[in-house]
Image (cartoon, rainbow, N blue to C red):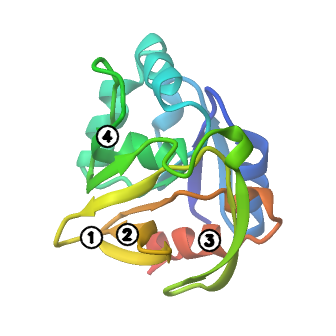
Amino acid sequence: MVAVGVLALQGDVREHISALEKAGASAVPVKRVSDLEGLDGIVLPGGESTTMGKLLTLFDLLEPLRKRIADGLPAYGTCAGMILLASEVLDGRHDQKLLGGLDITVRRNAFGSQVHSFEEDLSVAGVGEVHGVFIRAPWVERAGPSVDVLARVGEHPVAVRQGHLLATSFHPELTGDARMHEFFVSTMVS
């Protein structure tokens, strides 16, 4: 059984742990550097990306996690987690901290503010029809040549994969459907 951490500084930690367990993984909350030991992958949940960056720094997790991801630790970022994995952020703060790894440029709150949150059914390559919950969600403005776009809303990519990294603008952990988490876990066991 693979061990997958869930960054537990902010966001839908319990919901991701539940979805990972449904997907057949052992899920572990990550709050300290020592929690990274023995992980086969990590989920970066939604939340507020600038706050998460500050908390990663405060808890001395930013550089160790950045290094683990650069060294090949599989990571799945949802919403703010997508922003953390991006190489570039539009509309971000000048001091915004990123983990990087994905050759994408994202736009924060691209679909609008909290009142513009919405749900939509999507066709996700490799997964099938998925119900997407978008809450102050980003979208991908630019995807590099090694990035596979797995789903779009209109012309905007909202699910991408590059090697060992997966990111979605939406929150699959809020739907009770664990197939996105199963898809992520399958990348660690194949």
x then y, percent, for residue 162: 30, 67
Q: Are marks 2 and 1 in contact (CB under 8 Å)?
A: yes
The residue at which mark 2 appears reads as 161
Q: Which amino acid does label 2 sit on?
A: Arg
Q: Work out which residue is located at the far right of the displayed protein and give it.
A: 176
Q: Are marks 4 and 2 in contact (CB under 8 Å)?
A: no
Q: Nearer the viewer, mark 4 or mark 3?
A: 4
Task: Name which of mark 4 and mark 1 comes first in the sequence.
Answer: 4
Task: Name which of mark 3 and mark 1 comes first in the sequence.
Answer: 1
Label 4 to label 3: alpha-carbon separation? 24 Å
Badge number at residue 180: 3
Q: Residue at x 57, y 30 (%)?
A: 48
The residue at which mark 4 appears reads as 89
Say above or below: 109 vs 127.
Answer: above
The reply, left or right, for residue 120 in relation to residue 146 is right
Say above or below: 61 vs 75.
Answer: above
The quadrant holding residue 176 is: bottom right
Relative depth, front residue between 1 and 179? 179
Q: Which residue is drawn at 37% across and 69% down?
A: 161
